[in-house]
Amino acid sequence: MEAARLIAIGQIKQAEKEICKLQGTKNNSSLMWWEAVKFASQNILEGLEHDIELEASIEFREAMMYQEELEKDRPIDVQI
């Protein structure tokens, strides 16, 4: 998840560079495209950071341990 976070940050930085280059030009379609890339990347980054915070929480760890316990008790259905 950290790799995805770094990619999103890189996309935002690249979009900001491209937006700066395109501002004041007549290439509105490219400018709008890079603004959309930046917006989407920011949304992805926010979601990733939320997931990282959630996974670091004690409640999440407790829920995962409880789920693992439930899965241990479930019989395995294997078909050959």
Image: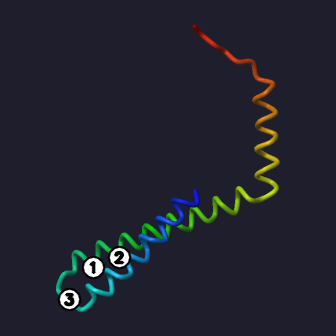
Quickly name the residue at label 1: 31
Amino acid type at mark 3: Thr
In contact (CB < 8 Å): disc 1 and disc 2: yes
Marks 2 and 3, the one that precedes in the sequence = 3
Residue drawn 22% across the image and 75% down it? 29
Which picture quadrant has residue 19?
Answer: bottom left
Quick one: SS at disc 1?
A: helix
The percent position of residue 37, horizontal first and vertical second, equals 37, 69
Question: Quadrant of the image for the C terminus?
Answer: top right
The residue identified by callout 3 is 25
- Name the mark on residue 35: 2
Quadrant hosting residue 21? bottom left
Residue drawn at 64 percent across, 59 percent down = 51
CB under 8 Å between discs 1 and 3: yes
- Name, please, the residue furthest toward the bottom: 24
The amino acid marked with disc number 1 is Leu
Q: Amino acid at mark 2?
A: Glu
Instruction: Give the mark count.
Output: 3
